[in-house]
Image (cartoon, rainbow, N blue to C red):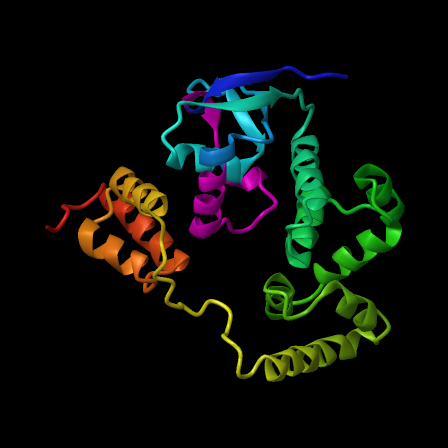
Amino acid sequence: MTRTVLDIPLGDIYLNEASNCRIEITTESILSLAQSIDIYGQQTPIAVSPTENKYYSYRLLSGHRRFRAMEYLGRETIEGIIREVASEQEALLLNLSENIDRESLSPYEEALALVNIFPEGATLRKMSKILNRSIEWCRRRRLISEFDSEIQQAFHVRLLGIRDVLALSTVKKDKRHEIALGLIEARREESKGQIPMGTVTKKPHKTTREIELMSSYFLNKKINGLPSRLLSWVLGYTDSKTIRRLTRQAEKSGGGLYDT
């Protein structure tokens, strides 16, 4: 069935992070997408559904990064398709399906999505049928959800991969934690001499458009110390985690005065 793509005002859409399977959307990824949209236009519409929220006409089902990118570009509308969803489970399924098709979720994000979609539990056969994924695909993600938070985080940052789940599934449950920690340590040893994840590296070659977009973002969020913050970002000394922290502080305090 063909669905009509509409130009929907951004202000009419409720952005609910709880409905997004992706745990984290980095500022860099939004900025990169914003640049692409600025040059080539929006290639894929978002999906929304009608909502009874008195302040909004729609709720966002999929396309959180596209929505954020259009905000940063200062656009007033975004291309979207209106979908009718019968339940919260259906909304989560739609979001998960799109992200899986893009192959951009970590194994842990996929495992967490299964927990949210099936909070009361379900057989692997039922999961497989609803998600249109193999039983083995579902089994491995469900196994990840059974590990403790330290090991789950390793799957999230990809110190452990989906193949490791298969190896761990053959080990007795009381030995899995020990084996998993051994695999994590081995990965860390392999990565020695390489730049650790989350390390801030200098990337001084920012384009004029990148600087304009980040400057606009800082202004819109009323982040204190605009000139110094922007210069630090341009020179590569401010990473996405710092920017998110500054944003939270600005929103909590209502915005601060800019230094000059």
Q: Quadrant of residue 158?
A: bottom right
Q: x and y percent of residue 121 in the render?
A: 77, 47
Identity of the residue drawn at 86% across and 55% down? 136
Identity of the residue drawn at 66% across and 20% down? 84
| Vertical order, 80 against 179 (above or below) | above
Q: Is residue 16 magenta?
A: yes
Q: x and y percent of residue 110 in the render?
A: 69, 51
Q: x and y percent of residue 92 in the render?
A: 66, 37
Q: Is residue 199 left or right of residue 248?
A: right
Q: Quadrant of residue 183?
A: bottom right
Identity of the residue drawn at 82% across and 56% down? 139
Q: In this picture, which residue range is highlighted in magenta?
A: 11-36
- Whether residue 225 can be seen here: no
Residue sitting nearer the eye, 29 or 140:
29
Identity of the residue drawn at 82% across and 37% down? 130
- The quarter of the rendered structure image containing the N terminus is top right
Q: Is residue 219 left or right of residue 123?
A: left
- Whether residue 221 can be seen here: yes
| Vertical order, 150 against 114 (above or below) | below
Q: Is residue 139 magenta?
A: no
